[in-house]
Amino acid sequence: MLNEKGFPCGPLKIVEVCNARYASEVIQQDIRAALMLPCPITVYTRNVKTFISALLPTSMAQFLPHAAIQSIVETVEGHVRKILDEAKG
């Protein structure tokens, strides 16, 4: 989209992952968590090297310390880390 609008940023893909059950649990604890959903994973190339990265779900708990979502986001983060590890091969 950025390239189409005249803002070249090179090869970049944003993949959004979401598990409805976990998303629902987090939102029930604090609706503001919806601002951080779904979890983005980016794949991009710089200087002919490909990178994969993600905003780890546990960062949600840091932004919403009173939401009691730590155990949920830790579980989700385990899944996201597995995706990252498998993608890196």
Image: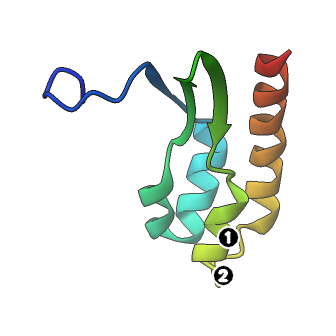
Find out whether the residues at labels 1 and 2 contact each other: C-beta distance under 8 Å: yes
On the question of residue 29 being in view, the answer is yes
| Badge count | 2
Residue 65's tag is: 2
Measuring from the top left, give residue 8's x and y in whole percent. Answer: 27, 27
Q: Is residue 57 above or below residue 61?
A: above
Residue beneath label 1, please?
A: 61
The amino acid type of the residue labelled 2 equals Pro
Q: Residue furthest bottom?
A: 66
Which of the 4 image quarters holds residue 1?
A: top left
Residue at 39 percent across and 22 percent down: it is 10
Measuring from the top left, give residue 43's x and y in whole percent. Answer: 57, 25
Q: Nearer the viewer, residue 50 or 86?
A: 50
Which of the 4 image quarters holds residue 44?
A: top right
CA neighbours of label 1 inside 10 A, class few (<14), some (14 to 19), many (20+) = some
Measuring from the top left, give residue 80's x and y in whole percent. Answer: 74, 37
Measuring from the top left, give residue 73's x and y in whole percent. Answer: 73, 56
CA neighbours of label 2 inside 10 A, class few (<14), some (14 to 19), many (20+) = few
Residue at 56 percent across and 22 percent down: it is 47
